[in-house]
Amino acid sequence: MLSQIAPFPPRTLAAEEYAQNAPIAARRLHPLGAQAVRYEAPMENYAAPGAPRPNKPGLPFRDSAFDLVIDRHEAYLGAEVFRILRPGGRFITQQCGGTNFLELNDLLGIARPSYEPWCLEAAKAQLQSAGFEQVSGREQVHMTLFRDVGAVVYYLRTVPCQVPDFTVSKHLVSLREIHRQIETSGPLKIRAHHFLVEAVKPRAKRMLGGRIAGAKRKRLSHS
């Protein structure tokens, strides 16, 4: 996904958790002028809405290193993103909402995931608690069509967090019923839930003769 928005600024880095994915990402990004680094991903954001969590695991970057941090469907520590952004820097993330595809769980007779409360307002509260300002976003629930039961199986095998330990044999009866429903009534309509959040790190301020003034931003040269 990142490679599709090249060309990049002079210093662009991508963080990747999975050992098997990191070298693939590095090989794809290096010719485009970007680097991939591995780091331990944090716990999911929905597990602790509201107050910022400890800065662990820390991102492997120095303080105030970046103008922009982007995140697509991944967990993040608001306090760590705040730390590595320069004053005035921007954070943009797209997230799957907590009610995403829950009807699939219902159709399979499986308990819904524990992240139902994860939504735009919860994400905004986290980022504001971490110190961000100008926190805004958009949220949308829209329909996704599954035109055959094979597509349902493919999705559930690709996104294991939706139905942990999913197998065709274990859920064969429910899958047959989904197949019958599609054959009888047409494509299966399942609600998808996504939201986009944008937040800004405040610019540093200092006191001058009783007045508050914005500190001048240092210019950095890149080799």
Image: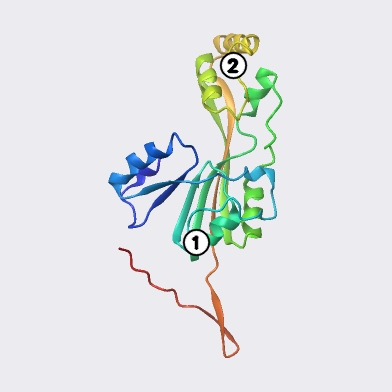
Q: Which mark is residue 85?
A: 1
Q: Judge left or right: residue 59 versus residue 99.
A: left
What residue would you read off at disc 2? Answer: 167
Please say if the residues under marks 2 and 1 sit with CB atoms less than 8 Å apart. no
Quadrant location of the N terminus in the rendered image: top left
Residue 16: x percent and y percent? 47, 43
Residue 79: x percent and y percent? 60, 57
Instruction: State the image quarter where residue 119 is shown.
Output: top right
Tag 2: amino acid: Thr
Please indicate, yes or no, whether residue 112 appears anywhere in the rendered image.
Answer: yes
Quadrant location of the C terminus in the rendered image: bottom left
At 66% across and 18% down in the image, what residue appears? 108
Q: CA distance from mark 2 to mark 1?
A: 42 Å
Residue 86: x percent and y percent? 48, 65
Tag 1: amino acid: Leu
Residue 81 in the image: above or below residue 1: below
Residue 122: x percent and y percent? 66, 49
Q: Which mark is residue 218?
A: none
- Which residue is most to the left? 31
At 49% across and 54% down in the image, what residue appears? 60
